[in-house]
Image (tube, rainbow, N blue to C red):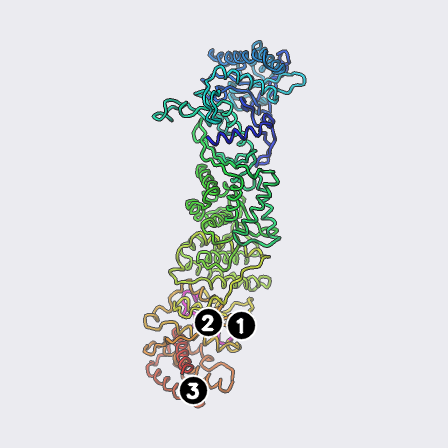
Amino acid sequence: MSWITDLVDLYDRNEHLVGIPKEIVSDNGKERTVCLLPIGHIQVNVPIQIDLNADGTFNNATVLRHEEQKTIIPTTLSSGSRSGSSTKSPMPLDDQLKYVARDFHFYSKKSKDIDFYQNYVNQLKEYKDYLAGHGPTSAYQTVSAIYKYVTEHDLLKDLVNYGIFGNQTAYSIVEKWTGKGEKPLLYQESSESLDKIFVRFNVWIKNEKPHWENPTMYKAWKSYYESKLRIESEKGVDYISRKTNIVLTNKKIKGIKGILPGSNNAKLISTNNPYNYRGRFYDEDEVVTLGYENSQKAQLALKWLIDRQGFSIDTRKYLAWGTKGEDMSVIEPKKGIFAQPLESLFQQLDNEELPDTNEQLAAKIKNAFLKGENICHLNANGNVYIMELDAPVTGRIDIVYYQSLDVQSYIDKLTDWYSKTAIYESGKNGYMNQNFSLRSLAVFRNGKHAKNDLIKNTVSSLAQTILGTQKVSWGILNGLYNRAIRPMSFNDPHGKSITWSDTMLSAAQLFRTVYPEFGPVLDKQIKDQNYLFGRLLAIADIAENESKKEKQKGYLTNAQRYMTIFAQRPLTVWKTIYLKLMPYLIKMGKDENKNYIVNRIQREIGEISILLQGDVQKLNQPLNGSFLIGYVHQKADWYHKCDHEEKQINFNMFSMDNTDTERSYLFGRVLALADLAESEVMGNDNSRATNAQKYLSSFAQRPLTTWSIIFSNLQPYLTHNQYAFRFKRSLDRIFNLMPSDEESMKHRNDPLNGRFIIGYYQQRNAWFRKEKIEDTKVISLNQQTNSRDYLYGRLLAFADVLENNVLNSYEIKRQTNAMNYLKAFKQQPLTTWKIIRLRIAPYIKNSRYGSTIVCYINEIEKRLSDSNAPLNGEFLVGYSQQRYSWYYKKENN
């Protein structure tokens, strides 16, 4: 019974507010009135007011506008919980027409309806007689005037004559207005049937307020009704106060209606169904007995809380209150006493050192909450109470969840939650953190067209998670994940309703509760594969958006289009996205205003790629939710230049793995060297694409064939590149890592997997760090193969090293004949080789290796046919592997 006790205490602490209406502003901006009701009273909407003189004579009748209709009226236990047309329990003063009008049965044509009136008058007379001897004079005058009027006048006829129902005759009143003239105000302000329309009486007594606003009248009814209950009701143990000989609530009727708005007939406490305790207790009294006063206090306090600060989804209400009824909302972060300090905190974070760990952020959040506690004079030693109620069936209210905890524990829970789920975004004035309401999170997870049951159950689960383990259930996380990776399912990603970006952000926030190793901001030290792929996808998304001169509403980037399948096969799909991204980078490179963006994008992709380690199978595993965190972190970091010291990557921690012989990875390294060699000569000018960039898509599909084109086009740049020898020796070392058995040769030109992009960026990083590619003792040169292409490549290599040997000894810097005739050699190898052979003749005499090389050349020429057909790209593999073999032996002998 703790929840009842807590509510009784709340009522007692706020008794000074009883009966005092207070205007509050709703979430929709409209004002509404709330009030803590007196014991023995309820609040109803009353559309008709009858003004009486003090002597009980009729003065005036008025139709009240909807905003004026809320009226506090006294009630009995039976009338306060009445439901159905068969119940004939009247309210003490103000009631429905069928109770207060003695002539109502003439309209309804039902003689039994006179019983409603008779019960009302009998009860009103008892109340009047009691006040004659015990009550205040003003209370007696008010009740007497009402009694005299309802017993001596035909109320319904008076209302008709006064035009309340328009131009209608008595006892022929229509339920719904169908006339052609102006619709009477009553039909505009009330949709109830005639028998259910409430009437209130305003007795004009000098210096007295209307009875529904008069504390004297509240006390008068309480005094009368409690004296009546002491005589007529049973006494026993009050389970709330644990006191004996207490006036108890009626056995059959213990509840108050109207606690939940929209569920007027729902009662929180009721014993109408004996099946609930059959087999366990003899009767309802063995289950529980409640004191009338405490039962009233608890239910009225609950109604007050719901009206004042309750958050609702469908039939479910969510409450969080403090010792004095303060709004301690956990459902809506923009409401409650902590809303303003929390919002101020994230607004000021940009003006100071940004906390990048959970612990640092938690300390700041807690200070903000304590500030809110001080502003609102919250009792630090008090408690916080959290309750969820629902009305799943007509007539019943269930308490779905209830918990009480001390203020400090509550602040600690909220501190932990907001620090665990914070992700900084770039705002107009700096960094900001979006604190979504739990309802918003539930809609993001289930969709805006989801059934209310799904929404409210998700909200309940999240609320209980915040106050419990703070690890969001996988059911919620998986739902968010599946929606976040499907941006194409959102009709309007930039619209005002649910946006994909909000869903993505909320998913990332909640996934942080199960992956605490990720902080609120981008951490470039993290090597987690899922996180890194999320960062890569974000960069691709950013790059394509940056290339657009004007953002197109509803436009989806390739990163967004491929996101669903990217989450399943990240390496494979990253290759597709990257290839589609290249035209945008080339386009931006031609715009001098966006040149710096291209450099930054390439740098970011490079930084991420060097962290990706593992084989194809490992890198192609489905991604978990941390990839969403990486995506959101990277986008936030891109759009906001951090004022705090950024943790840069220590590139020296990562060296090139020269033992990795995976084909795609090696071809990516080769492409990087070609790109770098050309860029060096162009002065890193992005306005013109390199051959590596131009042929990227073709290279990914037919790497060996395309490499022969790129390498041929690269020769003019190597002529002017001071690092030409280093470039070619690096190429030789990489090609030496490629196996050259017959089976490997068959698949050399197969399409590349996504690791070629990783190899590309890791090689770029190694080059800029001037990392030397170490020689390997394993030499891949295949001297047994009779592959025509491979053999011609070996011949070209011998011609090249021979001429280079002589040129270097004389310090002459120019291209060799082998490289000058490269393109012709590829198309007509036999013819071109004869020319090259003649041109290297002088170098044979001047080289100490001349005779040795001639022997190799003669041996290879014997194995070649007289065909002059063009060569495929395999000749360059033979070229590089022969060069590597030659230089390795000379350098290590």
Q: CA distance from mark 1 to mark 2?
A: 16 Å
Q: Position of residue 77 (x, y in %)?
A: 49, 20
Q: Position of residue 839 (x, y in %)?
A: 44, 86
Q: Position of residue 98 (x, y in %)?
A: 51, 16
Residue wearing tag 3: 838
Which quadrant of the figure contains the C terminus? bottom left
The one of 270 and 682 positioned closer to us in this rendering: 270
* Structural crowding at the residue carrying mark 3, measured as other residues with C-alpha within 10 Å and reported as few (<14), some (14–19) or many (≥20): few
The one of 656 and 183 positioned closer to us in this rendering: 656
What's the amino acid at mark 3?
Leu
Mark before the other along the chain sequence, 1 or 2: 1
Which label sits on residue 710? Answer: 2
Residue 61: in magenta span: no
What's the amino acid at mark 2?
Ile
Which label sits on residue 691? Answer: none
Indicate whether 692 appears above or below 170: below
Q: Which residues are magenta?
A: 698-717
Helix, strand or loop at label 2? It is helix
Helix, strand or loop at label 1? It is helix
Mark before the other along the chain sequence, 2 or 3: 2
Residue wearing tag 1: 680
What's the amino acid at mark 1?
Glu
- Secondary structure mainly formed by the magenta segment: helix
Q: CA distance from mark 3 to mark 1?
A: 33 Å
Helix, strand or loop at label 3? It is helix
Mark before the other along the chain sequence, 3 or 1: 1
Indicate whether 460 appears above or below 806: above
Residue 641 shows in the view: no
Which residue lies at the image location 39% right of the left edge and 60% below the top edge? 618
The one of 850 and 875 positioned closer to us in this rendering: 850
Q: CA distance from mark 2 to mark 3?
A: 27 Å
Residue 593 shows in the view: yes
